[in-house]
Amino acid sequence: MNLSPILTLIAEALKIYLPAMVANATPVFLKQGKPLDLGAKFIDGKRVLGDGKTFEGLAIGLFFGTYSGIIETLVFKNLLFIRIGLIASIGALLGDIFGSFIKRRLGLKRGDPAPILDQLDFIYGATLLLYLIGVTVTLEKFIAIQVITLILHIVTNRIAYVLKLKPVPW
């Protein structure tokens, strides 16, 4: 079995989605912040987003995600990666926020597991915004990044839990 095409696919998928992954991962380093929903409740009487989505988390995710796009620009000598970094970061953070909104509507509390939604909401958000600005993501890359993300999510969340960065291992 020739692994070269598979490794190339993984590398290409990671190249596009690295800023989204960084943007999604960095807010966990903040323990507190001002909630994006400012404590507001939705028409169903439940919090719009909850305490887990903060202005500070949004800012740090956007900063580091975009910064990773700048680094990719320098490494790959292609200015497109600055744009990809910014847009993928915004999309990832919006996808995660939307995931939190859905979880609140389902009656799930912060930290309650929501399989697939917890792991992939940011990938879907990033993909949507990248598509809207004309960045083509092939079906193969889209499937690859979902598989990679599911594996990385399990590993990184276990590490974050052991390091006491997250209250739950999922």
Image: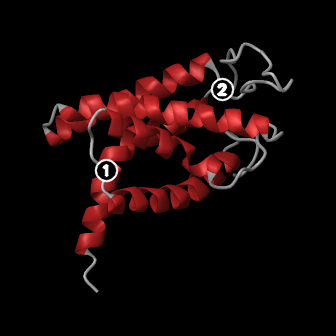
Q: Are marks 1 and 2 in contact (CB under 8 Å)?
A: no
Amino acid carrying mark 2 in the image? Lys
Instruction: Tell me if 73 is positioned left or right of 6 in this view.
Output: left
Numbered badge on residue 156:
none
Q: Which of the 4 image quarters holds residue 63?
A: top left
The answer to whether residue 28 shows anywhere in this view is no
Q: Residues within 10 Å of mark 1 (few under 14, many from 20)?
A: some
Q: How many marks?
A: 2
* Residue sitting nearer the eye, 55 or 157: 55
- Residue at image location 53% in from the left, 61% down from the top: 151
- Residue at image location 66% in from the left, 45% down from the top: 163
Instruction: Tell me if 94 is positioned left or right of 63 in this view.
Output: right
Q: Determine whether 106 is above or below 115 in the image.
A: above
The answer to whether residue 76 shows anywhere in this view is yes
Q: Residues within 10 Å of mark 2 (few under 14, many from 20)?
A: many
Q: Nearer the viewer, mark 1 or mark 2?
A: 1
Amino acid carrying mark 1 in the image? Val
Residue furthest out toward the bottom:
1
Estimate the x, y position of residue 69 in percent, counting from the top left.
Answer: 30, 33
Q: Which residue is mark 2?
A: 53
Residue at disc 2, secondary structure: loop
Residue at disc 1, secondary structure: loop
- Residue at image location 51% in from the left, 19% down from the top: 59
- Residue at image location 54% in from the left, 36% down from the top: 95
Q: Which residue is mark 1?
A: 137
Instruction: Tell me if 83 is positioned left or right of 113 in this view.
Output: left
Q: Which of the 4 image quarters holds residue 52?
A: top right
CA–CA distance in space, label 1 to label 2: 28 Å
Residue furthest out toward the right:
45
